[in-house]
Amino acid sequence: MSYADASFQEAYEPQGQNNSMTIDEMRILHRTALSEAESKRTELRLVLASRYRELVGSSDEVISMKERAEELNALVVALPELVERVVQSADASDAGGSTETLTTDESPFKVGKDEEESSLVAVRSELSRLPREIHRCLDDKNVHGAAAALISLFEVISSRSKSYPLANLLSGSKQIPDNIANSPLLETQMRMVYLHVQTLPTRVEKLARRVLLQSAAKHGGARGTSAALSALDLLDVGSQKNAAPSSGPSPYASRSTKLIDLYYESKAQLLNKLLNRLTLPTSVSAADATSVANAAEFILSKIVLILQYDVILHPYQIFVQRNFPVTNASENDATEEMKAINNKIVNDIMSSMPRFDSDLLKSKASRFLAAHLPLIRTKVKSVLMIIAGTTASKLGQIRQSLYDKTDGIECMNALDSSGVCSWDEAVSGMVDIRVVSHGTSFAPAVDSGKLSIGDNQGVAASNGHNGQQLGSSRRFSLWGALFSNTFSSLVHSLLTTSFHSVHARVVSTLRTSLARAPPFEYMLPHEAHRNALRIATDLDASLRKVSDDAHELLVHAEEREESERRLRQSLYVQTCEIMGRLLNELRRMLLVKQKEEDAIKELIVGRLCHLLKFRLASLPNLLDPKSSPAVLAGLGGGKSTGMISLMELSSSFDLADDDDDGLISIEEAMEAMESAFSGTHFDGAEMVRDTLLLSTSQSGAGDTASGVTNRTNGSFAPNKHSSAPQNVTLAELALLSAKGLRHDASGPQSALGTVQSSLDEIVTRCFKGWAQAALSSPLKSFRTKLRETIEVASTVSDIEWRRMNGLIEKDDDDVLKEIHDPATINDDLTQRQKIVVGHLSPHFLSYLLAVAAVLNRSICPADSLPPVPSLDYAKALGICFSEEEETVNMMVTIRGSLLGEAVSSISQSLKEEVCDIHGGADKELLKQCSPSSLIQLLMDVKFVNRCFFERNQNGFLSTSDFVDDSRGIMTNLSQRLSESVNAAVEDGLSIDRAISERHSQVFVSCGLFLSSIFGEDDRDKNSSLSDSVSNGVGGTSLLLSSSLVTNPLASSRRFTLLPIQAEKSLTELQLRGRYGKKVREEKESNKDVSSGNALGTGFGFLSSMLSTKTR
């Protein structure tokens, strides 16, 4: 059965079989039927539409045929009467000639009659010749020749009869002599010729207007334009062409003004038509991008030719010089005969037109340019933005092409090769810079609140440059007026879009990293380092790529210096703005605290900012001080007027900062910027809105922009109920206002220095918060134990204290008997007991070991590497180090933050428990403590002093006030405790030596852990544990004979092993081996099974999956 038979059988199957179809098959059948019905409906609609169009067209043709038939019928009906009149006239002429005889007395009358007959013959000859000449001119598209022939014909007709109004109007009203008598034959011929040519003036006028609506550079040149203008002037029934020149200039002035207005109105229509064609779709696919770009380039080339030839060059030749090139041949190659013919053509055309006022023409042309150049530039910018969004590589080609067609050498040679005038002469005679400057790039008055850097500085440079060239020959350039600043502004817009995209991508990646981060206690250091390194590396690569692409595609060859200057300035400003936005985003991320013990955000953001300090290798080139707007404005011939200094911005910021916290809200920032930039052409509030990407409705809320996250099941999610306040710092404002601010060339107040100092502040803040969260749990245990120790020391006796701490060598029963014996006095007991110095308090040592453990599990091997390869590299990044200083790496940063938090927390805890309200040691509390407890506390305090302020070789993250406060608290407390111990015991020197020995024992036994945070100390290595210190009282040792007993400590997890990337591949290879072995065994056991067996196919499919995963 054939395919057709099968289709027929399916179509006519019994409907009962549909019950056996599945639901999916029924749905497919339903969709197919609907689709076929819709296609048939569409086909029918198209057929009906085409038939309707044919019917309408046929009806129009029928109506036109009816009108022509009626005209022909009228002529045919009039023919018999005309023929009869001709016959009667001929008969009368023959009869008169046969009967009349002339005498010698009648000879003068005969002579006059002969002249009359010759005149009639000449008139009839002209009536026969001129219509043919008119049609020949129309066939050749010679509108001037046709118009001149029409005027000659109408003059002939009007000289013989006043019965034809159109002929009388176009030829001018002349007085007809009374003795002129037209024969019936002449009357008939004039009537027939008039009826034949009465519609030709309208046709010639349409042709002339059509010529004016075309580009003269491509169609006819100046000759065609002048011919069209002459034809329109000749056929203008309202013009007073026949008025004598001596009667006054007013008739000629009205004619000339009317022609100039008509000419420029036609060119305005032509430009508007091309601009409408230049409108491109908002979304262009990549496949159509090239064709769209080529079409836009073609239309732009047409517009440039119209502005050059139709608006400036040809009007100057026609209206001012009254001379124009007739042919494209060079003047030197033309022969004398050709020159004579060309001069005759020019004289014929120009003699029919009035004189034109050159000042009036210059004013008209300048106003025309002033009105249309901004429209063209706006349209060009919108089109170029669409092209740049789809095929940026085409943008450089369009720019080069437009420059070649405006200011290129070949273009200038073509404009100067007319042989009548040069381009410079035409520009000087047609363009008034003061009129054209309004609305073009030459204007000094600019709205800089919304102005791009390319426009602003381009205007200043153009003003200064053109001001120096006012006396030069070429003061106007289409490239400078239309495309130069347009492309510079386009570069800035493209850079703005690119930098916004880079900023959004960086922030999105950071938020994704924060959302996917594990809980704080499970965060591995190498994972945090890897994520932060990826973000920093991607940001640097994106900045470098934007810069490279901009230099490659958007720097023009012929004006490389100027475009390079503007491009570097735009890159400088855009880099400052993106860094200001990014710093603001990172800082405000830290303002919302999700959980007190959770510092994932601080850890990742701190690592990221630390890497941004050293990994953004593209910043020195992008933030080159020589590329700043202030410096480039001076190099371009202008001055950095209208720009403010950092001091002025700081003054406005301080006035807005009421609470002196270094932060102001967005509204206060707008007011401060308005105040700082008052008197300049910058809009401070608009600058803040644009650079921070704020809309007018988004001034108060910013859940998304603030980067607020919320902990949910071990990950972060946006929190809609809490958001960070929108505020800025002075450094961020200094970066965001880079287009109007004068940065220093180097130092902390330069753009690069401002970025580095802001990153330093964020790093310090992040790791300070991270250290507080990381040490919160050990700190709670430390404070609890310290409080219990102080309470016990102030409530029990000395012997009880020593017994509780294992400092008595007697049995507990003997000590208790002595304590409860009423005959025993505590003072005597104290004298009889040996003063023994115990070990360091466990809570002090455990807290320091916890700090070391946090450090060891929070770093990876990469943190110990130097962040910069050399000192010169660091200086290029704006990081100032002396040769003696060491570059701060991540290890130093994390350790410094932990040390600062540890010493601050210990000193504050001791201050709360031991010191009074004035900050000194509480004397009443110390009096209540026993001597042994005072010695123990003194040993602990001195150990803290020795660790943090003597042995500490690594320093703190920042030597701020809290370090000095902690040092003061610990020093004051140590002195008071020493005084109390000296008052309670006799040999204080032995106590100090014993305490020092105990400290050495701790450093030796726990040096592996403490050296990671405090550094190595050779004095502890050389100390001997076997030496005994005599107390001077009983000659016995103050140290216990037993060594320091320490509990087994958990592993510090100094370097957690990184996951091996090949582990997964190895596992897959092992699995593949197992599956392969199983397949071979099955093949051996089932040799008869074909290769298409389902089991074999299944294993093959799994093998292909494994191979795909392996690849």
Image (cartoon, grey):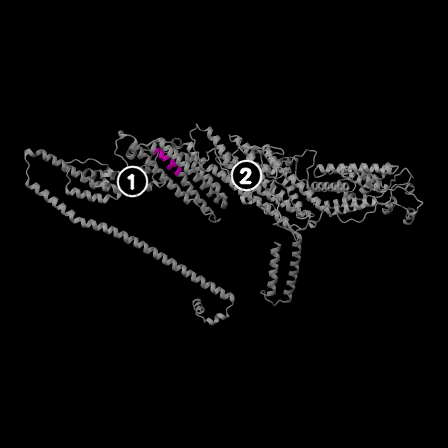
Magenta highlight: main SS: helix
Which quadrant would residue 216 be assigned to in this image? top left
- Percent of width and height locating residue 534: 62, 45
Residue type for callout 2: Ala
Residue drawn at x 83%, y 47% is: 1045
Point out the stretch of residues depicted in magenta: 306-317
- Classify the position of the N terminus by image quarter: bottom left
Residue bearing mark 1? 143
Badge 2 or badge 1: first in the primary sequence: 1
Residue drawn at x 9%, y 35% is: 109
Residue bearing mark 2? 685
**Along the line of sight, which residue is nearer the eye, 620 or 643?**
643
Residue 999 in view, yes or no: no
Indicate left or right for 273 with 1108 as reference: left
Residue 1091 in view, yes or no: yes
- Percent of width and height locating residue 1102: 61, 60
Q: Does residue 725 show up magenta in the picture?
A: no
